[in-house]
Amino acid sequence: MQSRPTVVVLAAGRGSRFKGDVHKLQQQFEGTTVLGSTVRHAIASHLPVVVVTTEQLAGAAGRLVAARDVVVVPQTAGGYGMGHSIAAGVAARADAPGWLLLPGDMPLVQPATLLAVAAALEHHAIAYAQYRGRRGHPVGFGAELYSELIRLEGDQGARRIVARYPAVGVDVEDAGVLVDVDTEADLAALRAPDAQPPRPDSRT
C-alpha cells in the first residue's frame, strides 16, 4: 500500500457554463493553464497525483504528469458524470491509504492545504478543507471508504457518502479552497491584479 493519500484531480467535466472555443481548464492562468496551475500545486505537495480527464484533454494532462498518472474516462450518453470520474480515479490508485478529491478548476488551492487534509485522514474517515468556517475542497476519504467510492456513478459525486459518515473540517488560511472557475467572469476575477479572496460571510 502507498504510504500517503493520492490527490485525484477531477478534470473530466464538460465545463458547459464556460462559453467559448477553448475549454475552461485550458484557459491561460499564472503562466500555465487553469488545470496546469491546479496540478502544479498538487505536485508541489509531494503527494501522489492522478488526473482523471477526457480524451479531449488527455494530451494536455499528459504534459503535466506522467502517462501512467492520467486516467481517461469515456463519455456516456449523459456526458461525463462526477461520480464516474471519482470512481475511476480512486480505482486507479486502489492501494492508496486515502484520496483527496480536487476539482481541476480550482487553481488556487495551495500545497500546504492538501497536506493538512491528508494529515487529517490519519485519524478521520472523511476530512475537508474549510476557510473561515466555509467548507471547500479538497475533500479527503480514507481507505475504509474505497468500496463506496468506486460504486459512484452519474453526477451525484460523493456528497451522499459525506452525509452518511462523520467528517472533520480542517481550518486553513487558504481562500482558494472556495474558488473555482465556472464562468468567464470567474476567470477574469482571478486574473485581476487586485483580486480579493471570497468574503467569509457570503454564500454559495
Image: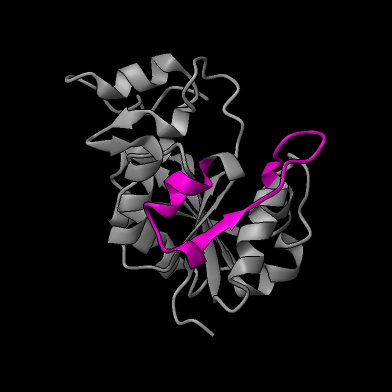
Could you tell me which residue is drawn at 31 percent across and 52 percent down? 41
Measured as percent of width and height from the top left, residue 103 is found at: 50, 43
Could you tell me which residue is drawn at 52 percent across and 15 percent down? 19
User: Camera-side residue: 126 or 42?
Assistant: 42
Is 56 magenta? The answer is no
Residue lying farthest to the right in this orientation: 77
Is 70 magenta? The answer is yes
Could you tell me which residue is drawn at 47 percent across and 42 percent down? 104
* Image position of 60 (left or right of 79): left
Residue 52 is at least partly visible in this image: yes
* Image position of 13 (left or right of 19): right
- In the image, residue 194 above or below residue 66: above
- In the image, residue 137 above or below residue 42: above
Measured as percent of width and height from the top left, residue 82 is found at: 67, 43
Q: Which residues are magenta?
A: 57-82
Query: Quadrant of residue 65 in the image?
Result: bottom left
Residue lying farthest to the front in this orientation: 59
* Image position of 166 (left or right of 28): right
Could you tell me which residue is drawn at 24 percent across and 22 percent down? 195
Measured as percent of width and height from the top left, residue 127 is found at: 52, 58
Query: Quadrant of residue 76 in the image?
Result: top right
Residue 180 is at least partly visible in this image: no
- Quadrant in the picture for the N terminus: bottom right
